[in-house]
Image: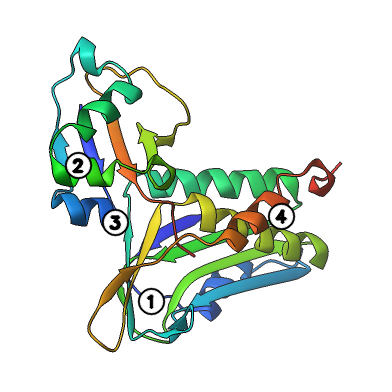
Amino acid sequence: MIRVQRDIFDVGKEIDGLTRGRTDIGAIVSFIGLVRDFNDGAEVTGLSLEHYPGMTEKELEKIEKEARERWELQESLIIHRHGDMSLGEPIVLVITASPHRKDAFEAAHFLMDWLKTKAPFWKREMNADGQENWVKEREGDLMAANRWSSKTNERS
Amino acid sequence: MKVLYFAWLKAKLQMNEETVPWSKELGDTDSLVRWMKSRGPAFAEVFSDLEVVRIAVNQEYITGNVTLSENDEVAFFPPVTGG
């Protein structure tokens, strides 16, 4: 399941929604990305996220489908926010559920690495001087995403 | 064709969306980009370094040259930075 929304999410509620009434799930992994107060050594005072409505949902659905083909997942959820956000607020949530921890851990890692390089979101940072900067793509993010393209990381 | 711009491309062009009439001369993405570069200083600047411009046709990433038709949606945007 994927959701693109302005509102803040509650990880506890979301996990409860995925697991309520079920006794077959053995492992839940959740990842939350937060707005932090620094980037590339500079102070950040706020963040705004733009996205491409329509394509964003399609890309997130593709990424989720890929994860569910590669790992044994009983449930998966991606929530990504857009709009203006304050420091410390959550930006993105990934939850994976599987019978055993390995699949949940790996799939959550994969989902985050792939969505960072594929889902059409763009971050704009505000700094203390009132300036705004579009965040630049990171080489490290591309390397992290490419790691999962390797055949050796695919499930046999 | 519907043409969309996002992030700093949108800011520099001061436009998020426009309709570009399809023609044989703009029949593929390479031709469309060449035409964009010729539209004035802001466009020339935005399309000067295609390493930092991603292209989607009908909400799918493309690489290389792709044929366009009248009802296509073409989007230009920088490398993504979500998550």
Q: Which mark is residue A8?
A: 1
Residue depicted at x 44% and y 64%? A80
User: Mark 1 Cα within 10 Å, few/some/many (few <14, many 20+)?
Assistant: some
Q: Which circle, 4 or 3, is nearer the viewer?
A: 3
Nearest the camera: A19 or A110?
A110
User: Mark 2 Cα within 10 Å, few/some/many (few <14, many 20+)?
Assistant: some
Percent coordinates x, y for residue A92 in the rendering: 48, 69
Marks 2 and 3 sit apart, C-alpha to C-alpha, by: 14 Å
- Image quadrant assignment for residue B18: top left
- Image quadrant assignment for residue A62: top right
Q: Which residue is mark 2?
A: B43
- Which quadrant is the C terminus of chain A positioned in? top right
What SS does tag 2 mark? helix
Chain for disc number 1: A
Q: Which circle, 1 or 4, is nearer the viewer?
A: 1
Height in image: A117 above or below A93? above
- Image quadrant assignment for residue A140: bottom right
N-term mark: 1 or 4: 1
Q: Which mark is residue A73?
A: 4
What SS does tag 1 mark? loop
Q: Do the numbered discs 1 and 4 sit on residues whose CB atoms are within 8 Å?
A: no
Q: Which residue is mark 3?
A: B7
Q: Is residue B4 left or right of residue A109?
A: left
Residue depicted at x 27% and y 74%? A132
